[in-house]
């Protein structure tokens, strides 16, 4: 049986593309390494976030503790059970989903993978300083490595 040279070239091209995609794509875990405690939400980003990250939770701005180097996940602790509306934004990144509703159960926390893309919204000069976030009693948000 003879194969056409174009068929061989297509098979080799397909194998090369598959290898390139496998090497070039970083793998984000779809499940957490450790169980998320009750009353907590972890947003796992697909790429490192430099920040500053702004978080609105149930209509209140929550202060996010972060370092200059940024982080790969945002952990929110101290939430009550039930539904919570969130909105994530940053001057340097875009998130998907950037807003939504979380239904927090009483026995465990929520782990959510969030697509992240770099975007510099301020083209020239320094961005305006943001007002201080008022926060909710007992709720903390931290950007982790």
Image (cartoon, rainbow, N blue to C red):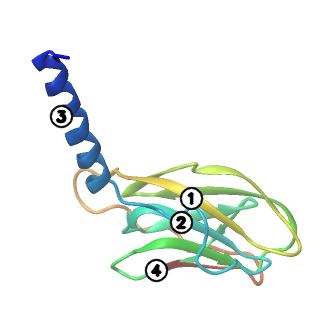
- Mark 1 closeness class: few <14, some 14–19, many ≥20 residues within 10 Å: some
Q: Quadrant of residue 70?
A: bottom left
Residue 45 position in % (x across, y down): 48, 62
Label 3 or label 2, whichever comes before in sequence order: 3
Given this view, does label 3 or label 2 mark the residue nearer the observer? 3
Given this view, does label 1 or label 3 mark the residue nearer the observer? 3
Q: Quadrant of residue 112?
A: bottom right
**Mark 1 lies on residue:** 113
Residue occupying image coordinates x 20% and y 17%: 1
**Are discs 2 and 1 less than 8 Å apart at CB?**
yes
Question: Which label was assigned to residue 12?
Answer: 3
Q: Answer with left or right where residue 137 lies relative to residue 116.
A: right
Q: CA distance from mark 2 to mark 1?
A: 5 Å
Q: Which residue is more in the foreground, 55 or 98?
A: 98
Given this view, does label 2 or label 4 mark the residue nearer the observer? 2
- Mark 2 closeness class: few <14, some 14–19, many ≥20 residues within 10 Å: many
């Amino acid at each position: 049986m003879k194969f056409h040279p174009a068929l061989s070239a297509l098979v080799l091209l397909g194998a090369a593309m598959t290898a390139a995609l496998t090497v070039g794509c970083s793998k984000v875990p779809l499940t957490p390494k450790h169980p998320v405690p009750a009353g907590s939400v972890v947003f796992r980003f697909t790429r490192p976030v430099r920040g500053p990250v702004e978080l609105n939770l149930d209509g209140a701005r929550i202060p996010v503790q972060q370092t200059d180097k940024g982080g790969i996940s945002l952990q929110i602790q101290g939430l009550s059970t039930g539904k919570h509306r969130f909105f994530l934004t940053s001057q340097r990144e875009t998130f998907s989903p950037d807003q939504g509703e979380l239904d927090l159960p009483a026995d465990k926390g929520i782990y959510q993978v969030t697509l992240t893309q770099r975007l510099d919204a301020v083209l020239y000069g320094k961005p305006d300083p943001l007002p201080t976030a008022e926060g909710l009693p007992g709720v903390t948000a931290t950007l982790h490595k």
